[in-house]
Amino acid sequence: MTTTRLKTLLAAICICGGASIAGAQSIDPIVEVGKQRTASARASQAKIDRLADETASLLSDYKTVMKQVDGLKVYNARLERQIANQEKRIRNIDASIAEASVIQRQIPPLVTRMLDGLEQFINLDMPFDLDTRLGNIEAVRANMDRSDVTSAEAFRQVLELYSIELQYGRGIEAYTDTIELGGSDREVDILRIGRVALVYQSTDGAETGAWNKDSQSWEELSAGDYAAAVRKGVRIAKKQATIELLNMPVSAPEAN
């Protein structure tokens, strides 16, 4: 009886042990599949993380590029405006060049007319510094025939002569000159006050006179009336005396 139970117990143990071994062998594939799934999930997550990083980097690059594109649009618009202005300026320059040849041909006749008018004015004006004034006109005329003097330079020189004539009407000067008095040449001191008065006084102070615009000749004045004033005016013009009011013979316009 005892032996039979022992055999039965051993047989049960063997059966249970065999079942445990068989159960363990059936679980191993499941565990292996779980491990593979975990590894696959990790790989997938790593791939997802990598793709997310690449996406973020691409988005950052895209934003940077878009900023550059916006900046280039503004820059290109500015360049287009500049190019349009430059093209307009080129058209204006081309038009000016086309007109320059016409103007170039018109300058010499204009300069000639201006010189003729200025010479006529000087001949009708008070006879002061005639050699210098008329000499300047002849010098400009001579320059017009020179190949190294452009028409623009000749025109500038004429304008300078006109400016000098304008200044003559605003200044006062005194100089020594030789004029014809009574049929003979006399050395006198000339005093010019703008274009208002042109008077003379002999070097010894004995004779004083003025230019008469109507008769276009020198006319002797009463020494007692103007001699001292003319002498004072000469000293003022030479900066040898202070400026003061002077009594000078002035030709006043007459009513018709």
Image (cartoon, rainbow, N blue to C red):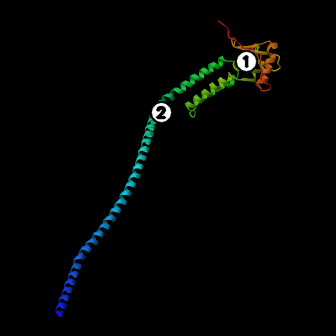
Q: Is residue 82 above or below residue 214?
A: below
Q: Would residue 161 appear left or right of 3 to someone viewing this image?
A: right
**Residue 141 appears in which quarter of the rendering?**
top right
Image spot of residue 219 (x, y percent): 75, 13
Residue 250 visible in the snapshot: yes
Front position in the image: 196 or 38? 38
Q: Residue at x 47, y 33 (%)?
A: 97
Which residue carries the number 2 mark? 97
Which residue carries the number 1 mark? 198
Q: Would residue 16 appear left or right of 204 to someone viewing this image?
A: left
Image spot of residue 207 (x, y percent): 80, 16
Picture disc at residue 211: none
Q: Would residue 54 appear left or right of 109 to someone viewing this image?
A: left
Label 2 and label 1: CA atoms lie apart by 48 Å
* Image quarter of the N terminus: bottom left
**Residue 213 appears in which quarter of the rendering?**
top right
